[in-house]
Each structure stands twice: as structure tokens, then as C-alpha cells.
Amino acid sequence: MTFIISLDPAKLRDWSAISAIDMHYVKEKKRFEYDLIAMNRKQGLPYDHPTEPSIASWALAVYKNQKFWDKKQPPHFLIDATGVGVAVRDILAAKGIKLIAVTITPGNSITRLGRKINISKARMIGKFLGAFDSGKLHVNPSMPIWPKLEKEMLGFRAELNAQGNTKFEAEEGENDDMLMSLAQGIWYGEEILRGGRL
């Protein structure tokens, strides 16, 4: 059993999302599978604040929740460090979270330097869809957040641009924060942890 916490931080007016995933080996199927055990999203949070709720205090509380620790081992904590995520990454690192900073890039590549990973959105989404389509990902439909997550998944689109690259985005006026938080965690399990690369 390995726990993965995946944070997709956002600007004040947008939604930030966090997922907690249990990655475990299923002996009968000879493969790793993933249970989404918790997910939440919040809007209107500053990056950090000494007394008010913030993305940093929210993420820190999730990270310290002992139900996401295995034998006193901390969960793998991922943060989308693209754009506004850079500031949140620095705040959380200063608060003592041993995190993996993920930066979303164009193309279809991946590069790693220590605990920093550059990954293309197409590659991340591809790994997520592969796990989802093969039944490796389990989401309890009675989770309160499920209707919103399902809506995001149904509204997510792929388009081929003039350069021949696939572009993944939510439909206009829709969000993809929860989907990206979940996809980041599943990708990490499938490509990094399962391959023993970090």
C-alpha cells in the first residue's frame, strides 16, 4: 500500500483540487491498481496566510493526516508546479513537505532532475486514460465529489493542433482541476513509482 497525495493549486478565483490515492498491488491480476480514497476542491484561497485558511494550510493538513501514511512513512506528495504552482511549491517545501514538483510541458516528453519532473500533458493524460480504461482506477460513486468529477471527465476534450500535437482541455466554461489532480497522481504511480524511477 502506497499513498499518493496530488495537488493542483490555482489562482484565487479558480478552483484548487487535491486527491488522495491508494496504490496497491493486486496479486490475482498481477498489477497495481488505484483507489481514489479522498478528493476535495476549494475556491478563493490565497497561497498562504498566517491565520486564515490557505492552499498551503489545506495541503499541509491533508499531508499530515495519518490515514494517508503507511507504517509511519509519509505519502508521496505531488504538486503541479506549473504557473502559480511555483509559489505554492516553495511555501510547502518551506513548511517541511518532501514534495515532488511536476511541471506540465508541451509535446510528449518527460525529464527528471531529482524531485522535479517535467511531463507533457499528453503523456500524463495518456497514462491516466490507460489506467482508467483498463479498470485499474476505482472511484466510489457514492463519494460526494463524484458528480463534479464525472462532469469534468465527460467535458474533457482532445484536439490535434497544426503542429500535430494533441491538446487536452476542459470545454469552454468548464473546470478540469479535479481531473488534473487525479490524472497527475495516477500518472505518477504508473510511470514513476511502478517503474521505480524516483
Image (spheres, helix red, strand yellow):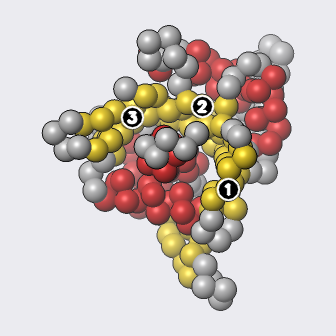
Residue 126 in the image: x percent, y percent? Answer: 47, 63
Looking at the rendering, which quadrant does residue 121 occupy? bottom right
Q: CA distance from mark 3 to mark 2?
A: 13 Å
For marks 1 and 2, give the CA distance.
18 Å
> Of helix, strand and loop, which one carries label 3?
strand
Count residues near mark 2 (Cα–Cα under 10 Å), then give few for <14, some for 14-19, many for 20+: many
Question: Relative to 62, is 81 above or below?
Answer: below
| Closer to the camera in the image, 72 or 67 | 72
Tell me what residue is drawn at x 46 percent, y 46 percent.
195
Mark number displayed over residue 77: 2
* Above or below: residue 48 compared with residue 158: above
Q: Amino acid at mark 1?
A: Thr
Which residue carries the number 1 mark?
111
Figure quadrant of residue 6: top right
Q: Earlier in the sequence, mark 3 or mark 1?
A: 3
Q: Is residue 92 above or below residue 146?
A: above
Marks 3 and 1, Cα distance to the nearest angstrom? 23 Å
Which residue is disc 3 drawn over? 23
Q: Secondary structure at mark 1?
A: strand
Contact flag, marks 3 and 1 (Cβ < 8 Å):
no
Q: Nearer the viewer, mark 3 or mark 1?
A: 1
Q: Is residue 196 left or right of residue 89?
A: left
Q: Can residue 158 be seen by looking at this rendering? A: yes
* Residue type at tag 3: Met
Residue visible at 16% across and 39% down in the picture: 28
- Residue type pointed to by label 2: Phe
> Badge 3: how crowded within 10 Å, few (<14), some, or many (20+)?
many
Nearest to N terminus: mark 3 or mark 2? 3
